[in-house]
Image: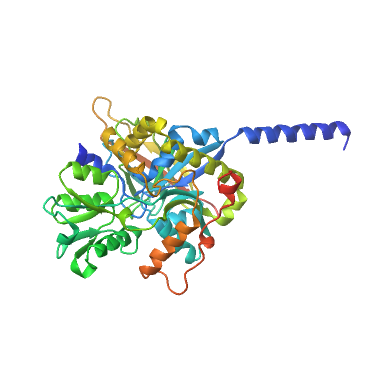
Amino acid sequence: MPPAAREVLALLACLAAGLAASQDFPLRYGQAPSAYKSVYSLPIAVAQRQGFFRANGVDFRTVVPLDGGADRMVAGLHDGTFDLMHIATTFLVRANLAGSDVVAIAAEFGNPIYSLIARADVSRIEALKGRTVGLADPGGSITYSMRKLFARHGLGESDLQVKTIEGTPSRLGCLRRGECDAVPLGQPQDMLAVAEGFRLLGRSSDVVPPYVYTVTAARRSWAAANSDAVVRYVRALAAAQHAIADPNMRPAIAATLAEATDVPLAIAESVLRLYAQPGPRVIPAQAEIDPQGIRQVIAFMSEAGQLKGPMPDAARFIDLRYLQAAGIR
Amino acid sequence: MLAAAAARAGAGAADHDEPGPDDGPVYFGFVKDVSGVPVRDARVTASHKDVTFMVKTNATGGYRFNVFAKNVNPGDVTISCAKPGYRQARVFRYPLPRDKPVKSVETECRLQREKS
């Protein structure tokens, strides 16, 4: 090849590299309907509203399959519907053990606070004996934490009339209709319920050790082949979580939460005050995954009878390379 | 107001509730093949800005979205359809009323079977 032609090719290669560097990485992020418009969408909403994805060169799009439970969501990773997804750690463990190569690449929420909210005439947990309680998925961490709370007050599940009701809004509905005497509610519905006159009896955070509640997950193989995009995503998520913890950002974050979850601003501000209280972090500082928090989830699942045989190693469910590449320990 | 807000606000990732009605018009319609036969289990997407919602069609090829707020301009919502073995041939939106509030937006999506 003549030297001039080689120079042209080299220049074209440089131009192509420059163009690629200036283009955003497209990322499709799957979010279950239950998470969309919930408080658990806050870090992503902040990253979008504050421009953290754009600043890190990510062309970010949220995909919400309305017919999707956790299994459908994991299938969405495998059939290419989306690249990353939001998932509760228990469901990730279940999917991984069933053969998927899905792993956590960043933590979104840890140590959720579920409030046990009761009718106004129920003044203490012991008074729920023989009454109807609406609980979530029997194998999930919400129900696990409520069992712990009841046990601390001398109640076993046989002491209660238990209904399985999926979703905080549905459980609040059961309470409002008078069909449930008590239910666990997340934010912001627990605060709305108390404002309506219902009574707060206790919180999940009083009885369970720290754990990793929800994560961003990817197929291990896909993440390895798209590591640059994943690292950019992790940086944006970490920036959002840092902003949520920044007192100077509180008004902007409250406005985002109110908008993202369709609640009044005052309720959103109350939620942020609750999350800022001393104790285990509800939202990680910078997307870090604590392997001990994953081990705790495995222990929950084992205690609930969902895992047979020896407990699996937490390392199987996480891939820390992208956090490390983003400078996060 | 608070009750409506609570009903709309979703639950945790361990729960499974769809977003509730969001005050905006219902986006609905049918997916058919080019000869007019309904296509079931086709994936229909409704996209607005940086969010895409997805559903599958029922046995009559029908779909329905009730997820956009009333301040979303229907002209900014893009409907598309797909199914393995087909390509999207045409998307047709029925005209919206000009002199009254839009309560529903009907869009028909046609698929053409790909030649094997």
Q: In the displayed structure, would residue A97 be above or below residue B49?
A: below
Left/right placement of residue A229 relative to residue A265 reads right
* Residue pictured at 68% horizontal, 32% vertical: A18
Towards the viewer: A311 or A273: A273
* Residue pictured at 35% horizontal, 60% vertical: A140
* Residue pictured at 30% horizontal, 64% vertical: A138
Residue lying at the far bottom in this picture: please name it: A309
User: What is the x, y in percent for residue B50?
Assistant: 44, 37
Q: In the displayed structure, would residue A159 be above or below residue A49?
A: below
Residue lying at the far right in this picture: please name it: A2
Q: In the displayed structure, would residue B55 be above or below residue A147?
A: above
Residue A179 lies in what quarter of the image?
A: bottom left
Towards the viewer: A13 or A201: A201
User: What is the x, y in percent for residue A135?
Assistant: 25, 59
Towards the viewer: B38 or A77: A77
Mark yes or no: residue B79 visible: no
Left/right placement of residue A141 relative to residue A154 reads right
